[in-house]
Image (cartoon, helix red, strand yellow):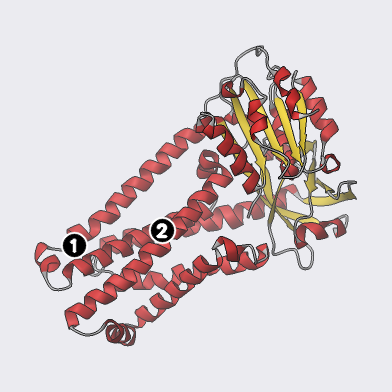
Amino acid sequence: MKASALDDAVGPAVRPSRRTSTGEVGLLLSLAAGGIGLGVILGLPLVDGTVHEIGAPGGWTLFLGSVTGLIGTYLALLMVLMAARIPTLERALGRGGVMRWHKNLSVLTISFILAHAVLTTAAYAKIAKVGIAHELGVLIDSYPDMITAFVALGLMLLIGLVSLPWLRRRLSRENWWLLHLLIYVALVLSFAHELVLGPSFVNHPVVQWIWAGAWILAGLALVVYRVLVPLLRSLRHELTVVAVEPQPNGVTKILLQGQYLEDLQLQGGQFFEWRFLTRGRWWQAHPFSVVDRQGDTLRLMVRPIGDFSANLIKLGVGTRVWFEGPYGNFTAAQQRKDRVLLIAGGIGVTAIRGLLEDLPRWSRPVLVLRVTAKTDLVLLDELERLASERNGKVYILSGDRTMVDLRTIAGNIKDFQSRDIFISGSPGFVEAVRDVFISLGVKRRQLHVEAYTI
């Protein structure tokens, strides 16, 4: 049907749906812990310094250099925790939210650490009454740990450069990921510099041990949740490829079979990071949503948007599969309103399909599928069946970007203000649709998104 027919989907819900979220509690606790940690970090240079030292030539500059360095390294610690995929944070923020925090923190981290390097060098130059370039040479020549610190700063600046959108788009996901790993090298190189030369750490063994302990715990979280847990789960569930089938619209259907899959506690709308153990693929992990689980079989639907996904059609039956996850809070557990509106752009329909199946039978969902051409539709028969079973409706909004105004989605659904709105698709599509509803006064807590990006 066309979008103009959407207005007949409204009607009274059979019963209300109310769910409480432990993710919200986890988010508040995480924010409180992060705020307390930042307060402690800001307090260190105040306790360590004196009014006389700050008032001396270069004192204020050196003080600000110390503060920016501490804040930058603390934010780097938070970045590592975000990258560790700790379950509490994943449930609270979702994968997309965690990645947004990680991205924003990375910009602040590099900015503060760069400011620290500039301010500290300038302060010592002022104290020694020499030029900044001369003082920089003295610092590097006199303090071996300073060399590794500047190498670490260079690596951070490189990572920041390749993460700029215009350059990021020119790199493959695999190359960008390999370059991104250099951040861990940079953090290791800078660690000795912090403890040996940092004014708040020198001659303060208790502070040194606390700081080292915090970084050790963050590193352990990274190893446990990114390496050990996925490894043990992969070994236990023994997933293998049992079928690879091309679909008429260019999508590849992949069936995976394993054991004890009910123990994964997979919710509709979630995804895994998949690692197919074949030559050239084993070191790459890519995110794909699970369409559904039938017993000990998982179904994936992958659209070829890059070299990796395009070559999955060549996967052999029997290929072993390792995985991380499940990830994401794009699930029915986020529903607060009596009804829902589901909006899928392109292959984003795979997450929507799983979520739709988890909705209660009385939920009367409205589902809008946005595609360039109707031949691009995926899983339409299943979506129509699941929606019908829940007394809901499916609508198709087709046409290229110049022909389709996304505001028609909201304009033709009279009760969108009283619905939870789930949006899945490319980052541009998700942002555009979300902006439409925000501009119409929909509260942000009603909007739940899953953007298909790195």
Residue 372, x across and y down, in percent: 78, 43
Report whether 402 appears left or right of 184.
right
Amino acid type, residue under disc 1 in the picture: Asp
Q: For the residue marked with disc 2, what is the amino acid?
A: Leu
- Secondary structure of residue under mark 1: helix
Mark 1 lies on residue: 48
Asked whether, in this view, residue 428 is left or right of residue 42, the answer is right
Q: For the point 70% across and 52% down, which residue is it? A: 234
Q: Nearer the viewer, residue 314 or 56?
A: 56
Name the front one of labels 1 and 2. 2
Q: Quadrant of the N terminus?
A: top right
Task: Check the image and report above or below for 341 versus 170.
Answer: above
Q: How many neighbours does mark 1 have within 10 angstroms: few (below 14), some (14-19), or many (20 or more)?
A: few
Name the element at disc 2: helix
User: Picture coordinates of residue 352 (x, y %)?
Assistant: 71, 35
Q: Residue 365 in the image: x percent, y percent?
A: 70, 23
For label 2, the crowd category at 10 Å Cα-Cα, with few meaning under 14, some 14 to 19 and many 20 or more, is some
Q: Closer to the camera, 441 or 138? A: 441
Instruction: State the residue in front, 91 or 233.
Output: 91
Q: Earlier in the sequence, mark 1 or mark 2?
A: 1
Identify the residue shown where x is 52% and y is 25%: 20
Q: Does the rendering let one see residue 159?
A: yes
Which residue was labeled with disc 2?
A: 108
Give how far apart the Cα atoms at labels 1 and 2 are.
24 Å
Q: Is residue 428 above or below residue 187?
A: above
Q: Residue at x 58, y 46 (%)?
A: 95
Residue 175 pos. (x, y %): 65, 68
